[in-house]
Amino acid sequence: MSAPSNSFQPDSTDLDRLHSAVKREKADLKPGLEPAPMFAMFLAMIIAVIAGGQLGSMTGDYSFGTSNPFGFSAGKDPRPGGGDGAVVMDPFQTAMKKGASGYAVCGGCHQGTGSGIPGQFPPLAGSEWVTGGTERLIRVVQHGLVGAITVKGQGFNTPGGMMPFGAAMSSGDLANVLTFVRNSWGNEAPMITKEMVDKVRSTEKRASQWTASDLEQYAKANVLGDVPAGPGATTAPAVK
């Protein structure tokens, strides 16, 4: 007798329909957690835009034209000192600001206070070498100084002397640093300009450091030239 045949065959088509139906079913959400209707979200967005505009008018005259983070061409540059709101500094103020940065080269020896180090490096604050003749000061920083010197009644003789730091600076940078030291720590003297430094450089081709005796002839000599602003100004300062 033959074995009975298995007449049941699973219908894969029915299983696929069942799975699809399950997938279409959505999980039940608890009351109050249903997503907000689209029209409600759109309405909230409009209210936020209108409220932002009203708030901006009460907080410093805000406008997108002046506070646009993607560019400043739409209006006045809102950055401090930028665009139409820029604060124009006169030549003396500019020289002081730039000279303060350039003074870092000198500060290691003469200190940030300009007081120097007793017995080692002479002070710049109240120094007759700083507020005296501009020609001597330019020459000292341009070519350096070696040997014994007297500053404010005190003797100094630094081994190796002062190196010619100014030789590595542009005329403008050197003028700014000298203007800064001549008007800091209680010092007050006319500014030194780029043109003055150029005049000294064009006539001096020195290869060695100065000595105090060599520079005595320039102790009270001032390089001729207009002083555009600050102490001793000889021409009108820039219009602010």
Image: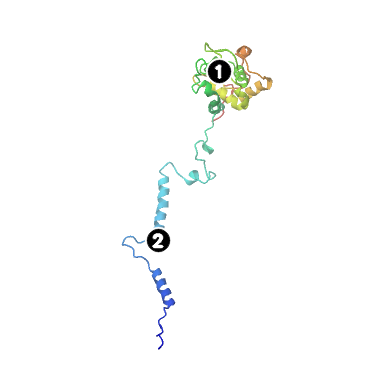
Quarter holding residue 220? top right
Toward the left, the furthest residue is 31
Q: How far is the residue under mark 1 from the one under mark 2?
A: 76 Å
Residue annotated with mark 2: 39
How many marks are shown on the rendered structure? 2
Toward the front, the furthest residue is 1
Instruction: Please tell me which residue is depicted at 41% across the width and 77% down the height of the picture.
Output: 14
Amino acid type of the residue tagged 2 in the rendering: Phe
- Say which of 217 and 45 sits in front: 217
Residue annotated with mark 1: 130
Decide if residue 96 is on the left or right side of residue 224: left
- Say which of 185 and 20 sits in front: 20
Q: Earlier in the sequence, mark 1 or mark 2?
A: 2
Where residue 84 appears, as percent x and y from the top left, is 53, 38
Instruction: Please tell me which residue is depicted at 59% across the width and 27% down the height of the picture.
Output: 173
Where residue 96 appears, as percent x and y from the top left, is 54, 26
Amino acid type of the residue tagged 1 in the rendering: Val
* Front disc: 1 or 2: 1
Q: Quadrant of the N terminus?
A: bottom left
